[in-house]
Image (tube, grey):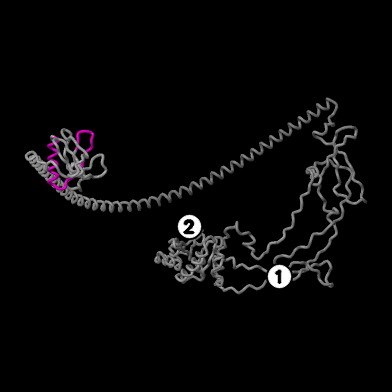
Amino acid sequence: MALNDPAAVMAAYSSIIDNKNNWLLLEYVSGTFDELGLHSYGNDGLEELKTKLPDVDEVFIAFYREERDVDPGYIIINYVPPCISSVRRARALVHARRVGALFKKHQIIFTIDSLSLLTSNNVHQAIINLDNAFSSPTSLQTTASPISTSPTKLPSETNKDDLVFDPVQSPPPRPLQPMRAPTQNVSKPVIHDMVRRSFTATYAPGVQPPSVVPPVPPLPKGSLFTHLLRRKKRSDDSPDAEDGLPPPTPPKDNGVFQTPQPVAVSYSQPPPPLPPMDRAVRRQRSHSMSEFAVISHNYVERHSDDIVVVEPAEKERTHNKEPTQLYRIPLRGKWSNETTLPSDPAERVQRRRELQKHREREEREALEEEEARQRQLKLQKEALARQEREEEQRRKEQVEAEIRRITAERRRREQVERDEDERKHRELEERKRLDRDRRMEEHRRLEIWRLEQARNAEEAARKAQEARRLEEAERRRKIQQAEAKITQTKTQTALTGWVTILAQDSLSWKRRWYKFVGTTMFLHRSPKDLTTLGQVNLRGNIRALKEWNQGYDDLEAIAFSFVVEFKDERDHWSMYADSEEEKYKLLGLLKVAGGL
């Protein structure tokens, strides 16, 4: 294992020791997982550390200092996710130990496989429990022994109505933990990943959940009307209250550390019964439909009036009480017609007038009450508006004072900024002047160099043109000499020779034996094989004879090469001879045969 940048890693480690930061994070920077590098560091604690993890499926090693003012602990956190292979897991443990050899201030190496375990409480427990290094904080939890809460009867000398409980068995003593100095600003543990951990597993790890859950009792069945009939209120002195007593109070949880006291159960007499209900029934509106049962009868004088059965408040369950009394109360509303209207028209008119006066009086009183309420609201609104105006005036004065203060501060700051801007402007102008002078000097030197280069280029071009002119004149002279020699001798040797040709219809160079007969050029395979492979009538068909520097740069590398351009649709022929003498002899023959 090696560090990618040891200087940066040790600088971050020194900043944590000097209380400038409180964590740093290392990650693998190579594909072979043999080189660690500094990923990030900070001073905002575990929450910032967890947010800096780029990938929760990779291995990370962190060095962390507790967020405590007095005697903070130092720990190396080795995050190894469960999805990696066993080989990489073992390698991560070995690398964590090697990092611990570098960070000598650490007290423990804490290995976790989930970010939900990375809390301040778990880190503190890992630091004070040095025996649990290289383990998850979940192993620090212990399960309390089961506690017996079964009630038992006392011996014969105790009262039969008293119930006591057996003494609660004390849990086995926990092993001694190393003591640390008292700390301050102890932050509460932050519980993460609450979806994966239940409330009991987080806050009460010693409580065992019941293994068998009692079944849910079935809901009562019945219709809506039956449910309304069952909603009749039950009095406190009904015989049902005496059927059974509530069970004894179960023992509290503090019985684990306290001696339980005997629980005395007393049986009190029920309250005396209410006096018998008077037979006279008062017509008063009930607030619950469950107090009445509506029964329709059609056998009483053959009418459809409904009656209400009013049961007494005391529900009789025994046979020695009086039978239930039935009372008929006519219902108003849509089930019955109004039967109290007088039959005299004058009395009905008088009643209507009284009702009209009563309504007018009620309306007048309502208007007066509304006017009084409106006056009261108006006074309240005026008081509220006055209070708001006073508050607004006070707030305006405060705002104006604040504005004056801010304005003075802004002006002072603006003056300071103007002075600073002027100073910077002067410095900038001076730098610009120096840069301008330097650029002008550089421009003058470059201009001199450019003019010199232009003169050199012009001189080189002139020399090249002169060389081309001389070369062209020499070429023409040699062609004329070859032409004169051919005209004078006209021997067979002067009209034949070897040449290599690249024609339009050929993909490669062909070496041929040429022979000129009049204005026709014949091509043979060799002097011994005079089979005609091609013949070209050159009279009036040659446009020009050109060198490679006249537009045929691909022939520059071939010695003694030239090009024959034709006037018809045929493409040009590229040729080269075996020597310069052969080249100019062939050029002379082509010029004579083509009539150039």
- Secondary structure at badge 1 equals loop
First of labels 1, 2 by sequence position = 2
Circle 2 crowding by C-alpha within 10 Å: few under 14, some 14–19, many from 20: few
The C terminus - image quarter: top left
| Residue beneath disc 2 | 54
Q: Is residue 248 above or below residue 288?
A: below
Mark pair 1, 2: CA separation: 51 Å
In front here: 11 or 524? 524
- The label shown at residue 258 is 1
Magenta segment boundaries in residue numbering? 565-594
Q: Residue at x 81, y 69 (%)?
A: 153
Q: Nearer the viewer, mark 1 or mark 2?
A: 2
Q: Is residue 434 above or below residue 489?
A: below
Residue 25 percent coordinates (x, y):
46, 63
Q: Is residue 156 above or below residue 431?
A: below
In front here: 588 or 305? 588
